[in-house]
Amino acid sequence: MKISKASEQSGLPVKTIRYYSDIGLVASAGRSNAGYRRYDQTSLQKLIFIRRAREFGFSIEECRELLGLYSDNARSSADVKKIACHRLEDIRKKQDELQCLYNELSHLVQNCSGDDRPDCPIIANLADVK
Amino acid sequence: MKISKASEQSGLPVKTIRYYSDIGLVASAGRSNAGYRRYDQTSLQKLIFIRRAREFGFSIEECRELLGLYSDNARSSADVKKIACHRLEDIRKKQDELQCLYNELSHLVQNCSGDDRPDCPIIANLADVK
DNA sequence: CTAGTCTCTCCAGTAACTGGAAGGTCAAGG
DNA sequence: CCTTGACCTTCCAGTTACTGGAGAGACTAG
């Protein structure tokens, strides 16, 4: 199939598939005489795999690693689990950060009257040297 | 004061202060004969303001807007509150996304034996067409 | 006078694409 | 046979918010 079909089937934009091919993440199965990229079931599966891994927030480099494990039938599940656990750690950290932000900012917003007057605790807080 | 002092006082890297000056976010108070940027209390306050706003995750463009409101003594607190509420919305959305991710991924991780065998539910799930 | 520390500008790179221009390819219709 | 339109190609630029480094000028202490 050509790239637009691969795009449709994988759920990735055409541009992104070309990009993945450029950076050597997922090569096409070959080229037609006219130079068009061809995709077969194997390369399509890899595109789908990458799309899902990206949805999980794995970086391109992590995807590259996971793809290596995906293609390696002798992989140990421990290797995969390690990468996934890293990602879980990242998510947990980000969650904590966001929670802190949310608490602080919503506190400020609650104390802001939100009317025509210029007094604003949000601005005041941002301007405060800390 | 020169840029390194402003960096120290504001908590922003020198490079970042130059960058903010380049993009017209916070101009220096002027230049010395040698062309060195000079910072006074007003410009320093703005740098601090921006640092704190960035810590809250406001984008540069939002910072620009907030800085306008900060410098405008006739601002209404409603204008500020609106931007802050937007940001709160963003945070909430991001939190929801992360929670979904966390649930899905930790579920997969729990079901992965993490041993030498090649069977891995994480890989299997990523490879699944969905 | 020199060594070391600032400072300056400019260029490139980061992550992961996305948009657009210029041009080649292919199938269908008149 | 020619054209139209939908594809496809490559290459370049832009996005966000910086960060690193080169090369060169400025200033300070000894």
Image (spheres, coloured by chain):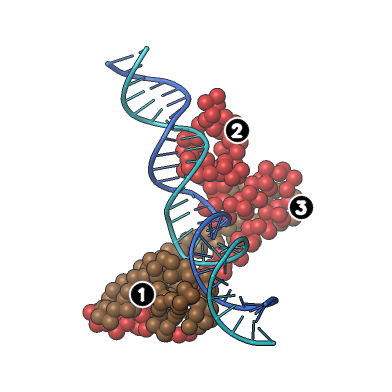
Chain colours: A red, B brown, C blue, D cyan
Crowding near the residue tagged with mark 3, few <14, some 14–19, many ≥20 C-alpha atoms within 10 Å: few
Give the chain letter at badge 3.
B
> x, y (%) of residue C5?
62, 78
> Residue at 48% of width from left, 70% of height from top?
B18
Q: Which residue is outermost to the left?
A: A116
Q: Please state if A23 lies on the left or on the right of D16 as rendered.
A: right
Give the chain letter at badge 1.
B
Say if labels 2 and 1 share a chain.
no
Q: Can residue B58 be seen in this view?
A: no
Callout 3 amino acid: Asp
Q: CA–CA distance between discs 3 and 2?
A: 31 Å
> Residue at 48% of width from left, 42% of height from top?
A15
Mark carried by residue B67: 1
Q: Nearer the N terminus, badge 1 or badge 3?
A: 1
Callout 1 amino acid: Leu
Q: Can residue A116 be seen in this view?
A: yes
> x, y (%) of residue A6?
51, 36
Q: What element carries label 1?
A: helix
Q: CA–CA distance between discs 1 and 3?
A: 56 Å
| Residue carrying label 2 | A29
Callout 2 amino acid: Ala
Quarter assignment of residue A47: top right
Mark carried by residue B116: 3
Q: In this view, does A86 lie above or below B121?
A: below
Q: What element carries label 2?
A: loop
